[in-house]
Image (spheres, coloured by chain):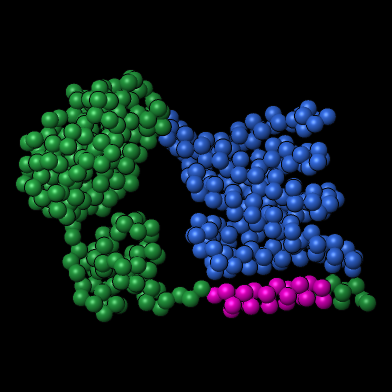
Chain colours: A green, B blue
Amino acid sequence: MNPIVTAVITVVAIGLASGIILTLASHFMAVKVDETVVKVRGCLPGANCGACGYAGCDEYAEKVAGGFAKTTLCVPGGQKAASDVAAVLGVEAGEVKPVSGMVRCCGTAQHAAYVMDYQGPKTCAACNSFFQGSKQCSYGCLGYGDCTKVCKFNAISVVDGVAVIDHDECTGCGACAKACPNELIFMIPKTSRVHVACASHDKGAQTRKMCSAGCIGCMKCQKTCRHNAISVEGNLAVIDPSLCTNCGDCVSVCPVGCIKIV
Amino acid sequence: MKEMMVILVSAILVNNFVLAKFLGICPFLGVSQKLDSAMGMSIAVTFVMAMATAATYPIQKGILERFGLEYLQTIVFILVIAALVQLVETILKKYVPTLYKSLGIYLPLITTNCCVLGVTILNITKQYTFAQSMVNSVGAGLGFMLAMVIFSGVRSRVEASDKIPEHFRGLPITLIAASIVSVSFMGFTGVVEGLFH
């Protein structure tokens, strides 16, 4: 047969075979996409920031459409996203609760023990990659202010080697939380004004040697709290913002003074 | 067995596809910023390389050589690889959704990646048997993974440094760092002869 014809037929045949296989595959192996999920996803900003607590906007859209999540969890989307999503689902729009950041460390220069005189690049990321920071406590605030550089609202500053957030200036965008290499900043509801300023899971005796203001897991706060809002998990006290009434009993009873009121 | 080891070590270290042959620079520079995305990308590339070899080798021997159409190699290989990757993505999405979530986004990126096409064409050029071709492809993928992981470590250090001159920041210093890593891999040149002979 004419070689040109052979070549053309071969390539056309291979192409046609591939096309047919792909069409059949897309037909029989199609994953059903729920219309509602697509519509809900369209109402979300698409930043995939994870503030809602799910792994990205796609997952949140799935959970909301399935009725497993509230419509008000999207922080960057705010009230508008919440009402749009509620409109798609045909339910009442809830209220978006404003959040604020809190730094889980109070190990200032007078409390924390240092393990080295760090001379490298003055960024938290660089300091953390060098034996987990210059403080003895590997969980603590590194103090070089990567968080302050990303804050657009001047709500966070480094005072005495520890980052401090201005509760009123903070808009809850979460940029500082993402920038912190030790993941020390948590976003909690703005109404919650009592928080544990420590992230150390080390045992009490060890923590005591590394930082005089670190949580030693003594459980005095847990026994004092009348609302069951604070509990010690893994040698660290944790407050549940939904149960806490800001009464401040735990603050006065803590022997090291690591629970703060803003 | 020994020649399989020679092929494997050669593909991973001596003739590393990224650092010695300079194929696949695009995903190498694009996805190597974080370690987990670098790992995901290189696993996807290894997977695609192995499947591409398994598909293109029989087509070369069974169709192209039988009809004397070896000159159509480039077109047919690209066609087959693109269709194959699309098919794999559809299958993954349907049957292994967890794998699709972690690897799926990289698959369209490596459809016409030159290192995938390169490994399939090189298998033919070097006249390997089918088994040798598969070993070569897996080795190429593993070499890609090694280069990516090493470079993601280098990159995170380079990015944390504040001593880089302003006009070198970003792509220029990344390319210079990549070339230094490539030069360091030249040290493996005598390994194959030394180890196996």
Vertical arrangement, residue A230 with respect to residue A38, above or below: above
Q: Position of residue B187 (x, y in %)?
A: 69, 29
Question: Magenta stretch containing residue A258, yes or no?
Answer: no
Main SS of residues in magenta: helix
Asked if residue B172 is positioned above or below residue B184 in the image, the reply reads: below
Give the image location of residue A230, x and y in percent: 17, 45
* Residue drawn at the location 74% of the way across and 62% of the way down: B55
Q: Nearer the viewer, residue B194 or A158?
A: B194
Left or right: where B118 falls relative to A37: right
Where's the C terminus of chain A, which quadrant?
A: top left
The residues colored magenta run: A9-30
List x then y, in percent, for residue A98: 18, 57
Query: How many numbered callouts?
Result: 0
Task: Report which quarter residue B74 is drawn in.
Answer: bottom right
Is residue A26 inside the magenta stretch?
Answer: yes
Point 66% across, 33% down: residue = B185
User: Can residue B105 be seen from the camera position used here?
Assistant: no
Residue A66 in view in this figure = yes
